[in-house]
Image (spheres, rainbow, N blue to C red):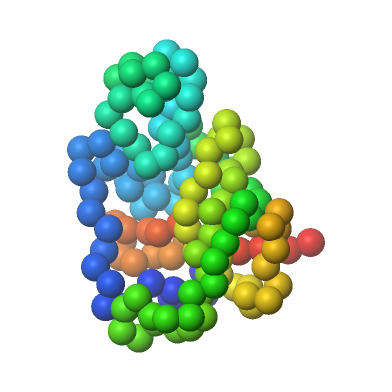
Amino acid sequence: MSQRFFPDGMPPPLADAISLPWWEAAAEHRLVVQRCTSCETTRHPPAPVCPECRSADSDWNELSGRGQVYTYTIVHRPIAAGQELPFVIAVIALEGAGGLRMISNLVEVKPDRIEIGLAVELVWEDMSPDLAIPRFRPVER
């Protein structure tokens, strides 16, 4: 991603024992989701047990990073000092994720060009060598 989106004034996300594998994959620019090995339900954010069958057994599936805008909002008030406005928060229906959706930001697009169903692809915002944040941009056609 050519431009930094995350404002300097915002604290970085925190990893715990459950989410650490997700953050480690993200640092390698790999988008993964947790999958229950008992019933195959995918989940994000990561959790210690499956919300469907209550199994504690899971693995990680890597996704393509493609999807579609499920819904979005355009934000006109800053959350942190120095944040460029407006910005877009979107819910992305992830391809190959069993119906899973992820909340992120749409970048590299003017807000008036966004619509429900817009095809998007993953881009990574590198915050440090150990921290990358997933963002989405429109797929170039």
Residue 38 in sight here: yes
Q: 4 and 115: which one is in front?
A: 115
Is 52 placed left or right of 47 in the picture? right
Asked if residue 110 is positioned above or below residue 127 in the image, the reply reads below
Q: Position of residue 5 (x, y in %)?
A: 44, 74
Q: Which residue is situated farthest in the right direction here?
A: 141
Camera sees residue 122: no
Residue 40 shown left or right of residue 138 in the figure: left
60 left or right of 119 in image? left
Q: Position of residue 11 (x, y in %)?
A: 24, 68
Say which quadrant the C terminus sits in: bottom right
When the figure is inspected, residue 88 is found, relative to residue 19, above or below; the finding is below
Q: Position of residue 26 (x, y in %)?
A: 39, 50
- Residue at horizontal 33 percent and vertical 16 percent from the top: 55
- Residue at 37%, 42% in the rendered image: 45
Left or right: 102, with 9 as reference point:
right
Residue 68 location in percent, x, y? 65, 51
